[in-house]
Each structure stands twice: as structure tokens, then as C-alpha cells.
Amino acid sequence: MSEPLKPESPAAAKVFPSPNHGERKDGRRPDMLLLHYTGMPVDGEALQWLCNPVSQVSCHYFVFPDGHTLQLVPEARRAWHAGVSAWGEDRDLNSCSIGIEIAHPGHDGGLPPYPDAQIAALERLCLDIVRRWRIPADRVLGHSDVAPDRKRDPGELFPWERLHKAGVGHWARPAALSDGRFFSRGDRGTPVEALQAMLGLYGYDLRITGAFDEATERVVTAFQRHFRPERVDGVADASTITTLRDLIASRPGPMS
């Protein structure tokens, strides 16, 4: 009898293998960590779906609300979690990332708060992964960051600041909400070009057109969900732009 598989992270209790994975392309190693919510009302069904060959989806780790954590795919393998997505110059994010699914009903399930036990377990798991793979803080992202046209997870209630304080991810204190000039759908001109350039500089996949179109609104919304969650409306107000500026200015350098 063969010995049971052991999880690669001490934060995981056991291996619950999924068949949905392949080779990482172009010899890529993981240098990105992507966080998702399952968006399903029944956690066990979400886990089974990630392990069903029919689904063609998977992740490396799965975290239950009580903190119980399973490994589904070996870290060196290409799990199928990011889908059509982009960040910076990268397009095949499955080949350069480790994906974690957080059991949570999501926006369609009312977006309840994440349980403390779940986030505490996630902190331990993420900290272990980023340390072992030397993943830069600004490449710890949500699914909505890399696929803003179709994804909302892990959502505006996800405690990114708490993870940052634990040593995971990039964060700058969001600028206070205030009145003043803002940019929204339909606006055009050099200031909109500058906004698009700043979002692209940080990593969001956005063409510089000078037109505040639907794509720009979706990227601004994704940015707010992660970095300025107090108001998520897709409007580039002073608070949003200042927070983006502060993130760019405080961005950590490359890891040696």
C-alpha cells in the first residue's frame, strides 16, 4: 500500500487530488499568487467541482470557512484557475501562478463577511507560499484584478489590508473619500489617458485610448474592490487616483 500524499505547505491538512492540471508552459515558475472565492452556496459541491474532470477547472489549494485547508494540485503543476486573464506582460497566468480557492458564496450569495478562522488559515498558507516561491508583494492579486471584465472575486469585503499586515501582498492606506473632480464613463482627454497609463503601469490590462469607456470603468471597479473598497462604483475620483498613485510610489522592488 502506498503512503498517502503529503501537502507541500504545512498550512494544509491533507491532499485531495484534482486531475485538472498540466505542465507549466515555457518553463515558468510560480511568481504570482491569485486568490478566488468559489461563489457557490455549498462548499463540498465547490470542492467536488474543482476535482471533476468534466469541469476543466481546479486550483492548488482550497480553504474552508473553518480554516481546514486542502491541497488539490501540486505547486509545480499548472492548475486551471485563472482562465482568460492578464497582468502586466503576462497572459497565461495559469503558468506563472499558484491559485487558492476560498470557500465563500460570493456576491450572488449576499457577500457575507469572511470568517476569522478562514482568513487566519489563509494568512498562514499565503505567507508560506510567498516565502518559499519568493513571490513579490505586488503579484499577490485577486481574480478580479486579472480578469476585470468577468470576475468580481474575492470581492470588496476581502481583508487585503489584514493579509498585508501579516506579510502578504501590497497595500497602501486608501485616500479618504472627498468631493472634487472625477472621471467616469464618457469622459475623454489627456487626464483619462494619464489614468489609463497609471493603471497599466501597476499591471492592469488596459489600452490607453483617452476615452473613459466600459473597459476603463471595469478596471477602475476592480482596482477599487482591491485597494479602495469603501466605495466601489467605477468612478475615478480623487480618492481612487491618489490611492493608485500611492501604490505605484510604494511598490516594492524586484526580489533578488
Image (tube, rainbow, N blue to C red):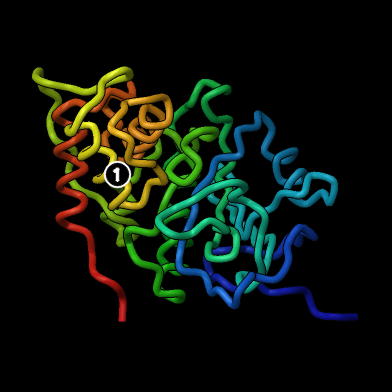
- How far from the left and from the top, in percent, is residue 85? 54, 48
Residue 245 x/y as whole percent = 16, 45
Q: Residue at horizontal 46%, vertical 62%?
A: 32
Q: Residue at x 38, y 35 (%)?
A: 219
Q: Residue furthest right?
A: 1
Side of 80 relative to 55 (left or right): left
| Position of residue 209 measured from the top left corner of the image (x, y, whole percent) | 33, 35
In the image, taking residue 135 as reference, residue 27 lies left or right, namely: right
Residue depicted at 28% across the width and 32% down the height? 210
Relative to 160, say whether 150 is above or below: above
Q: Picture quarter containing residue 189?
A: top left
Residue 134 percent coordinates (x, y) = 40, 74
- 154, 4: nearer the viewer: 154
Q: Say which quarter of the image contains residue 224.
A: top left
Q: Is residue 3 positioned above or below 104 on the image?
A: below
Structural crowding at the residue carrying mark 1, measured as other residues with C-alpha within 10 Å and reported as few (<14), some (14–19) or many (≥20)? many
Q: Quadrant of the C terminus?
A: bottom left
Q: Quadrant of residue 207?
A: top left
Relative placement, left or right, of 157 versus 37 is left
Residue under label 1: 199
Q: In the rendered view of the protein, which quadrant contains the N terminus?
A: bottom right
Which residue type carries mark 1? Answer: Leu
**90 vs 125, nearest the viewer:** 90
Image position of 21 with respect to 189: above or below: below
Q: In terms of secondary structure, where does tag 1 sit? A: helix
